[in-house]
């Protein structure tokens, strides 16, 4: 199983970056975790849209799903007889996207023919080709779901956006790679009060307790010092610590 970073910024893209988006691949199965602003371009450097098995959205903040709008327009008007791409949303996600569609266009139904929208439930596995994704609800300002992605005995855990909580520990337990948001790392401004995100030290504490092999920090504020974030995490986690950046690949 391979993890490819498509975008790793929080809220807005930084120079040469995109917001949250991650490609998980195993053989001919390719699944996108989140589809934030600017991620579709980097995605197509690695896999054709026709070969994408599904998109799984962790939560309904725009920096995690907004490129679904661009994808809809591209599939509707740019590809003859395009195959609808399966999109798995958190509970309430279809109604949320329908409200967005009504603000964007008078075309109804807006998503049909381009994206096939589904909703997942906490703990109920999604069979996605050779991969299995298990949603774990975590704690954020809105409902947010980390994903535990399994390929045989290899496990990738993705935190989504969250605060420190017991649920992340269960999500990460025994994973080979933990892909963790670290919005409060690397000198980022602390505008959230109360905080709704992890720091690098928080993510490292989860990685250490869960016994993971590698920690990949992501979801950085666009001004963050990523090298500083890695050094912050290394004070609490003795394993391999890496900073996500567009185009980086990791074998899980």
Image: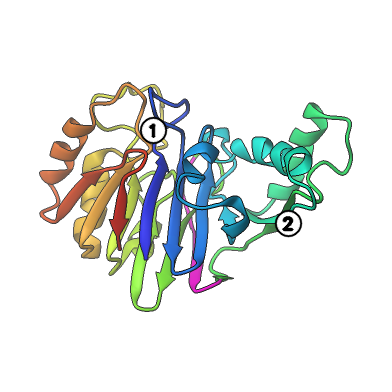
* Picture quadrant where residue 51 is located: bottom right
- Per the image, label 2 sits on a secondary structure element best described as loop
Identity of the residue drawn at 34% across and 48% down: 180
User: Disc number at residue 76?
Assistant: none
Identity of the residue drawn at 33% across and 60% down: 169
Q: Residue furthest front?
A: 80
Q: Residue furthest bottom?
A: 152
Pointer 2 local density, CA inside 10 Å: few below 14, some 14–19, many at least 20 = some
The disc, 2 or 1, on the residue closer to the chain's N-terminal end is 2
User: Disc number at residue 195?
Assistant: 1
- Where is 9 relative to 21, above or below? above
Give the Cα separation between the discs numbered 2 and 1.
Answer: 41 Å
Left or right, 220 with reference to 92: left
* Picture quadrant where residue 245 is located: top left
Identity of the residue drawn at 73% across and 49% down: 94
Left or right, 128 with reference to 177: right
- Per the image, label 1 sits on a secondary structure element best described as loop
* Main SS class of the magenta portion in the image: strand
Magenta part of the protein: which range?
129-140
x, y percentage for residue 233?
Answer: 18, 43
**Residue 139 among those drawn in magenta:** yes
Left or right, 220 with reference to 185: right
**Residue 185 among those drawn in magenta:** no
Left or right, 95 with reference to 220: right
Q: Is residue 200 visible?
A: yes
Q: Is residue 166 visible?
A: no
Contact flag, marks 2 and 1 (Cβ < 8 Å): no
Residue nearest the observer in this picture, 189 or 231: 231
x, y percentage for residue 192?
Answer: 41, 26
Q: Which-is-in-front pick, marks 2 and 1?
A: 2
Identity of the residue drawn at 23% across and 26% down: 225
Residue under label 2: 83
């Amino acid at each position: 199983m391979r993890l490819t970073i498509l975008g790793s910024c929080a809220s807005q893209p930084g120079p040469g970056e995109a917001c949250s988006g991650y490609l998980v691949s195993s053989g001919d199965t390719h699944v996108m975790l989140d589809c934030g602003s600017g991620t579709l371009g980097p995605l197509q450097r690695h896999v054709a849209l026709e070969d994408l098995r599904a998109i799984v959205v962790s939560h309904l903040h725009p920096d995690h799903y907004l490129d679904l709008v661009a994808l809809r327009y591209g599939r509707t008007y740019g590809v003859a007889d395009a195959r609808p791409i399966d999109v798995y949303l958190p509970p309430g996600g279809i109604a949320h996207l329908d409200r967005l569609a009504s603000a964007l266009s008078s075309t109804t139904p807006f998503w049909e023919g381009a994206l096939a929208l589904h909703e997942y439930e906490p703990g109920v596995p999604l069979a996605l080709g050779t991969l299995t994704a298990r949603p774990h609800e975590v704690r954020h300002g809105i409902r947010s779901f980390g994903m535990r992605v399994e390929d045989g005995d290899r496990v990738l855990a993705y935190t989504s956006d969250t605060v420190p909580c017991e649920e992340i520990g269960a999500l990460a337990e025994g994973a080979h790679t933990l892909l963790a948001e670290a919005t409060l790392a690397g000198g980022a401004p602390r505008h959230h009060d109360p905080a709704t995100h992890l720091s690098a030290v928080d993510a490292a504490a989860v990685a250490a307790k869960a016994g993971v092999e590698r920690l990949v920090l992501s979801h950085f504020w666009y001004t963050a010092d990523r090298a500083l974030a890695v050094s912050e995490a290394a004070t609490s986690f003795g394993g391999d610590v890496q900073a996500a950046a567009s185009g980086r690949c990791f074998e899980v």
